[in-house]
Image (spheres, rainbow, N blue to C red):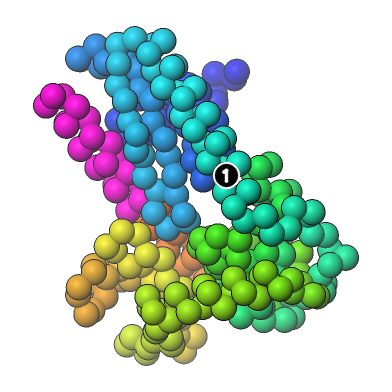
């Protein structure tokens, strides 16, 4: 390994990740911190995210490397079983979808509200199945016709989970929607209407139209656009329960604004993940 390779840490806990295996929706980790003052040099943790919130859980600290590796192996086995059971429960469509099953990914077309297929190679090996490729597009700058950004936000029809992809990772709109996918879409749309009927309704704030939203925990980050303003783009944040946005970052181009939006969201994810790790460690020390 090159000496210039950047170390990967568990947030800023001081623990460096040494082993990591990602299976299904979780990444199983082993990390070490040989400077830990309590002699708890090794950590096993599991990391998961849904594109909005990332968190570490099932965290275990130990002075014994072998004990942590036992937990690491158990975590891997548990994830393999969970993925197998999930596939058996769905049993929708194992055969991968190809470009032949889709209309061409026409960048001049708005794909919002369409069922599209994601490139199988983009997905993790265990999810490279036709049912896992089909998603329902809800919003995103990349979903628009002639997009100036690339983010496409959607719901997986196989399990209803939210996801984010890039426009170039979309094969195209599916030509023939399978019956199971239509049924899943009806179910997902019904749930969305119950949970947040106005989730993506147009919103205007101070002359800026909100075009992107990223929810992280109790914090909502948004991107606003007003092409007539001196600074056409702005990112804001709003804490749950409050009616107004604050801490605006005003920018001159959309790519910078998109980057700022996701930087702010990622910082909040890191803060939430770090807080979760610290709380779990505090509880383990209290025992």
Quadrant the C terminus occupies: top left
Please name the predominant secondary structure of the magenta segment in the image: helix
Residue drawn at (55%, 60%), measured in percent from left and top? Answer: 159
Instruction: Examine the rendered structure and indicate whether residue 70 appears above or below residue 57.
Output: above
Residue drawn at (54%, 26%), measured in percent from left and top? Answer: 5
x and y percentages locating residue 26 in the rendered image: 49, 41
x and y percentages locating residue 188 in the rendered image: 52, 73
Crowd around label 1: few <14 · some 14–19 · many ≥20 (10 Å): few
x and y percentages locating residue 61 in the rendered image: 29, 21
Observer able to see residue 161? yes
Instruction: Examine the rendered structure and indicate whether residue 80 appears above or below residue 239.
Output: above
Residue drawn at (23%, 69%), measured in percent from left and top? Answer: 240
Figure label count: 1
Residue drawn at (37%, 13%), measured in percent from left and top? Answer: 67
Q: Residue furthest right?
A: 100
Q: Is residue 220 rendered to the left or right of residue 66? A: left
The residue that disc 1 covers is 85
Q: Secondary structure at mark 1?
A: helix
Assess whether residue 69 is covered by the magenta stretch.
no
Instruction: Examine the rendered structure and indicate whether residue 114 appears above or below residue 82.
Output: below
x and y percentages locating residue 21 in the rendered image: 55, 30
Magenta residues span: 267-287
Observer able to see residue 133? no
Assess whether residue 275 is covered by the magenta stretch.
yes
């Amino acid at each position: 390994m090159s000496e210039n390779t950047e170390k990967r840490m568990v947030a800023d806990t001081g623990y460096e990740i040494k082993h990591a295996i990602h299976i299904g929706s979780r990444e199983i980790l082993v990390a070490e911190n040989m400077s830990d003052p309590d002699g708890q040099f090794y950590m096993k943790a599991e990391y998961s995210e849904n594109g909005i919130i990332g968190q570490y859980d099932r965290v275990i600290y130990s002075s014994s490397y072998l004990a942590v590796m036992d937990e690491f192996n158990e975590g891997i086995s548990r994830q393999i079983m969970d993925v197998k059971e999930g596939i058996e429960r769905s049993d929708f469509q194992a055969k991968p979808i190809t470009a032949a099953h889709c209309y061409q990914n026409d960048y001049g077309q708005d794909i919002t509200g369409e069922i599209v297929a994601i490139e199988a190679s983009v997905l993790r090996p265990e999810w490279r199945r036709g049912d896992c490729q089909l998603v329902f597009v809800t919003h995103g700058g990349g979903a628009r016709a002639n997009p100036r950004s690339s983010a496409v936000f959607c719901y997986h029809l196989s399990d209803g989970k939210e996801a984010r992809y890039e426009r170039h990772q979309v094969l195209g709109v599916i030509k023939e929607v399978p019956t199971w996918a239509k049924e899943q879409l009806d179910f997902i749309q019904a749930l969305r209407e119950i949970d947040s009927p106005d989730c993506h309704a147009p919103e205007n704030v101070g002359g800026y139209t909100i075009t992107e939203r990223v929810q992280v925990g109790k914090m909502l980050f948004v991107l606003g656009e007003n092409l007539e303003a001196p600074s056409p783009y702005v990112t804001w944040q709003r804490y749950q329960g409050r009616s107004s946005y604050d801490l605006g970052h005003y920018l001159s181009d959309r790519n910078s604004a998109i980057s700022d939006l996701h930087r702010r969201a990622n910082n909040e994810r890191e803060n939430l993940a770090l807080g979760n790790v610290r709380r779990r460690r505090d509880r383990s020390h209290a025992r």
